[in-house]
Image (tube, grey):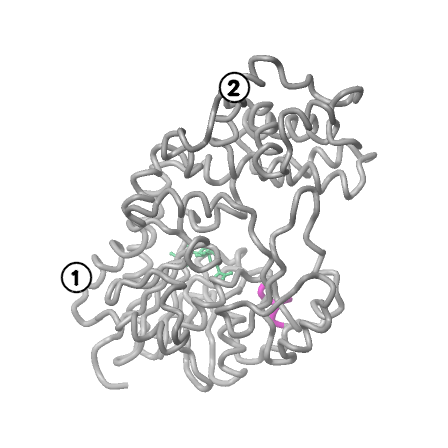
Amino acid sequence: MRLGGRLAAAIEVLEDIEKRRRPAADALKDWGLSHRFAGAGDRAAIGNIVYDALRRKRSAGWMLGDDTPRAIGFGALLLEWRETAQSLNQALEGDRFAPPPLSSEELNAIASRSLDDAPEAVRADCPDWCAPLLEQAFGADWVEEGRALAARPPLDLRVNTINANRDRILGELSGMGAAATSLASQGIRIPPIDGSGRHPNVQAEPAFQKGWFEVQDEGSQVAAELAGAKPGMQVLDFCAGAGGKTLALSAIMENRGQIFAHDAEKIRLAPIYDRIRRSDNRNIQIVTKPAELVALQGQMDIVLIDAPCTGSGTWRRRPDAKWRLTHRQLDVRKGEQAAILDAAKVHVKPGGLLVYITCSVFDEENRAQIGRFAADNPDFSAVDHQALWESHFPGRADAARIVPNGGIVLTPARSGTDGFYFAALRCAGQT
Ligand SMILES: C[S@@+](CC[C@H](N)C(=O)[O-])C[C@H]1O[C@@H](n2cnc3c(N)ncnc32)[C@H](O)[C@@H]1O
């Protein structure tokens, strides 16, 4: 397929996403199934246009003076593929599968508009209702932070130190542009792809099949490191889901001590069994029965809550979620977070730590949530997050937003990771 056919396909997929309010991955998969002639390269390019259009939906629409799937599809190519209006129309010429070329009105809009003049929420590529939330979180930097949340993400891996080391995996993946991450001690980064390219399928690598590494954003790895788990500790991962943090903690604990992996939804834990087997983890116990959880009350050195959240920190990877999110969903998540904090705290032993993590950048789910919890629970007090950060990442104060007793925020703009929030509170008493 030439660029025109790929663009037409991307516009079709964007129409489907808009009409049926469905996840981009599902719409792309359906398109692939009903167009089996399209090769892997075509499908990757179409996916890239769709994801770029969703990440940059408002600025792409602004450029063409419209917000239709056609406008944002063309806009994505102008903003992210180094195309110009002229180069695009030239590429579409004579391609019978291409959408109609840019019209004179569209060409005029592109020529007369500059993103520098666009409203702030357009430049930040976020829904209007989210603009005050970003501003509350980032103050004067909110547009820059929003823009970074709309960029293409890298592919991050975490080396499993139980059975591998970073140099060895870097050697295995040489030729993919892989390099050590700048913060996470066991992270490897493959930079964002350009244009129609696609990330290598690292899960097809023998090293992945042998459990030598996992796919995990560097921010998630940093949050797991900050939790401070040590070999021999008793740790409850209260919202373990597919086990990303559980596995990272197990490696940090060198397979010693015990991690209890719990989730309210048993089905969410399903992938963890295979991952544990592949990664040689021997200190993880899955906890699904309420009685098993009760037995852990007051026993844990660390209770880690990787809370359900809006996922606003992951908009680079799931840009469709940015446009589906509603204020009501934010309120629901906040209620869940408060309830989980209350349910989880009873498992922390005197002197132990309650660790709260989200992959959101909204203050209401983060600092405000923890502030309220600390006010209602005087037996828990926030650790010195500045000192905690410095002890893990000396000299890298530039790489996070730290509120000394209010937590640590990682962002694409500041940390080069997905957006994450981390807070640790110590329970009163002697360990
Ligand atoms: C952010 S995800 C966890 C991701 C996981 N820790 C990882 O690193 O891969 C949040 C999880 O919280 C779980 N959850 C939601 N409400 C819960 C509750 N009341 N108690 C325990 N887990 C809950 C969800 O089922 C979901 O799997």
Which callout, 1 or 2, points to the residue nearer the camera?
2
The answer to which of 426 and 137 lies nearer the viewer is 137
Compare marks 1 and 2 and give the one earlier in the sequence: 2
Report x, y in % for residue 327: 34, 37
Is the C-beta of the residue carrying label 2 under 8 Å from the nearest atom of ligand 1?
A: no
Specify start and end residues of the magenta stretch as a single range: 272-276
In the rendered image, the quadrant that contains the C terminus is bottom left
Q: Is residue 275 magenta?
A: yes
Report x, y in % for residue 165: 63, 79
Going 22% across and 59% down the picture, which residue do you hit?
371
Circle 1: residue type? Ala
Q: Secondary structure at mark 1?
A: helix
Going 66% across and 24% down the picture, which residue do you hit?
86
Is the C-beta of the residue carrying label 1 under 8 Å from the nearest atom of ligand 1?
A: no
Q: Is residue 374 magenta?
A: no
Cβ atoms under marks 1 and 2 closer than 8 Å: no
Q: Where is mark 2, residue-wise?
A: 109
- Left or right of residue 201: residue 20: left
In the rendered image, the quadrant that contains the N terminus is top right
